[in-house]
Structure formats: C-alpha cells, structure tokens
Amino acid sequence: MSDRKPLIAGNWKMNLDHQQGIALVQKLAWTLKDVNHDYDKVEVAVLPPFTDLRSVQTLIDADKLQFVIGAQDLSKFDSGAYTGEVSAQFLNKLDVKYVLVGHSERRTLHNEDGDVIQAKVAAAFRNNLIPVICVGETLEELEQQGAAAVPIQQLEKALEGHKEIGEFVVAYEPVWAIGTGKVATAEQAAEVAKKLRSSISELVSDEVAQVTRILYGGSVKSANVAGFLASEEVDGVLVGGASLDVGEFTGICRFQKHVSL
Ligand code: 13P
C-alpha cells in the first residue's frame, strides 16, 4: 500500500432528489459509525446532483459527519450570462472539495471535447476545487490501441497549458465497464494506473506523480473492490450504481477488511 490516502467516491449521477439524498447520507453515516470506519485512513466522498448539494452540505455540517462532498460537473466560466451553468465559485461556497471533469457521460452525451475539459480543469484550479479528471477508452479503442493509449491522451490534454497545476485526482474509467457489469481485471486497472502515473511524472513532475491519487471506476461492487485496491497503483474507486445502495457502498468503503495490507 502506498502513502496515498485512498478515496472512495460515490457518483450518484442523476439519481436521488435532495430528500432521498439526505436519507442516504444519514444511513451511510450510521452504518459506517457502527463499523467504526476510520475516515483518517480512507476518505469517503459523496457526489450528489446539484440540487442536493446544499441539503447534503447542511446535514454534514450540522451532524459533523466526516464525508466530503463532490460535484458532478462545473462551468468553465466563473460567472455571467451562462444560463443553466453552475460556477465553481458557488460550489466552493458549499464546501465542495472534488468535482468530476471529463466523465465519459459528459464527453459522449454532452459532446464535451478536450478543450472544454481543459477549461473546466482550469476553472476548478482557479476556485480551489480538486478536479477528478476522468479518462477511459471505449471497447473499440481498447481493441485497436490497447487500454492505456486513450486515457493517457485524455489526461495530457486535460493537464496542458495551465498556469498553475493544483491538486488533482485521476479516475480511470473504461467506458465499456461503466454501468455494464463488465469490469476491468485488477491487473488491467493497475497497469493503466501505472502508465497514467508515469505520464503525470512527464507532464508535471515526479513529486506530483507520487502524491496524485489514481482511482478505478466501472462496475465497482463490494465483491470486486478489494482486487483493485490490492494494487499499489490504484488509490481508490469511483463508484456509480453501487453508491446508491448503503450496504454495497459501506462494503466498498471497508475494502481494507478484504485486502491484506
Ligand atoms: P458504475 O459503477 O455504475 O459502473 O458507474 C461508474 C461511473 O461512471 C462512476 O463515475
């Protein structure tokens, strides 16, 4: 196990209204308390829809819960006439720590290209949010170019041209594994994570590469999480469907129970 603190992040996607969101966070807090979860050892983040953020933040604040909050998207602009957009400044005011950038659903369903993603990463850095830069290849790209080529190109583009690079997280999410029940093997995930870390060394520095957390995402469940996190290279997971189920997500947060460290 490396010195990097593992991050378990639940991306709720477009699920759970603010009342359902509060209920889930409360149940999750109780369940993790019952099993004495040590948040200093494993960080737990919830990434609710925008409309839930204020309620979840108020609950976390009032009950002094140890979860951190992430957002699923942000605008590349900080303010102005951009109807429907959400500024990183506003997210920062809501104690949001992480923000997803470049999730494959944004890349494909919302046509976000490398330039948009790069500008969103810049907006996150400007406003003290930690971008979770999502990268991953489609099945076709996997067959034609292998697993690491596209994720590395996407990461290079996202990190290019910034005046200053703040803290960031990388999430390797093979598109073919998202919501499909097909998972990468632990070896595949570790190999891509290792290559992504080398490219951070080249793009930024060895020091940054050593402290940057690289997550795996795509059909992660309590039954398969330990395999991914047994590797030195993988520093956490980005969980979709299984983060909506308190039992499953608790099992994922407790991955160390299954991993020999
Ligand atoms: P699933 O865990 O549902 O496959 O989703 C992964 C994901 O896209 C997390 O961002």
Image: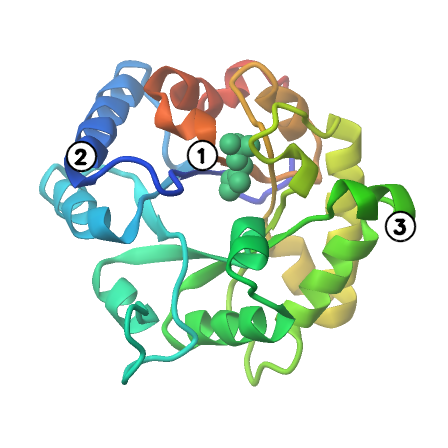
Is 257 situated above or below 191?
Answer: above
Q: Tell me the CA gap for discs 2 and 3.
A: 43 Å
Residue 130: quarter of image: bottom left
Q: Which SS class for mark 3? A: helix
- Residue at the disc numbered 1: 42
How crowded pointer 2 is (Cα within 10 Å; few <14, some 14-19, many 20+) is rated as many
Q: Please provide percent x and percent y for residue 208.
A: 64, 63
Q: Which mark is residue 22?
A: 2
Picture coordinates of residue 196, whole percent (x, y): 74, 53
Q: CA distance from mark 2 to mark 1?
A: 22 Å
Label 3 and label 1: CA atoms lie apart by 34 Å
Q: Earlier in the sequence, mark 3 or mark 1?
A: 1
Please state the horizontal and vertical placement of residue 122, each as a whole percent of the image: 50, 76
What residue is drawn where x is 57% and y is 14%? 223
At a point 68% along the width and 59% down the height, the residue shown is: 209
Q: Nearer the viewer, mark 2 or mark 1?
A: 2
Quarter that holds the C terminus: top right
Which tag, 2 or 3, sits closer to the chain's start? Answer: 2
- Helix or strand or loop: what does disc 1 sit on? loop
- Pointer 1 local density, CA inside 10 Å: few below 14, some 14–19, many at least 20: some
Left or right placement of residue 148 versus residue 168 in this view: right
- Residue at 51 percent of width and 15 percent of height: 257
Q: Tell me what residue is drawn at x 56 percent, y 68 percent.
A: 117
Which colouring convention does the figure follow? rainbow
Which amino acid, by three-letter code, is at mark 1? Val
Q: Residue 145's mark?
A: 3
* Figure check: 225 above or below 47: above
Does label 3 point to a residue whose CB lies under 8 Å from ligand 1?
Answer: no
Indicate which label's residue lies in the foreground, 3 or 1. 3
SS state under label 2:
helix
How crowded pointer 3 is (Cα within 10 Å; few <14, some 14-19, many 20+) is rated as few
| Callout 2 amino acid | Ile
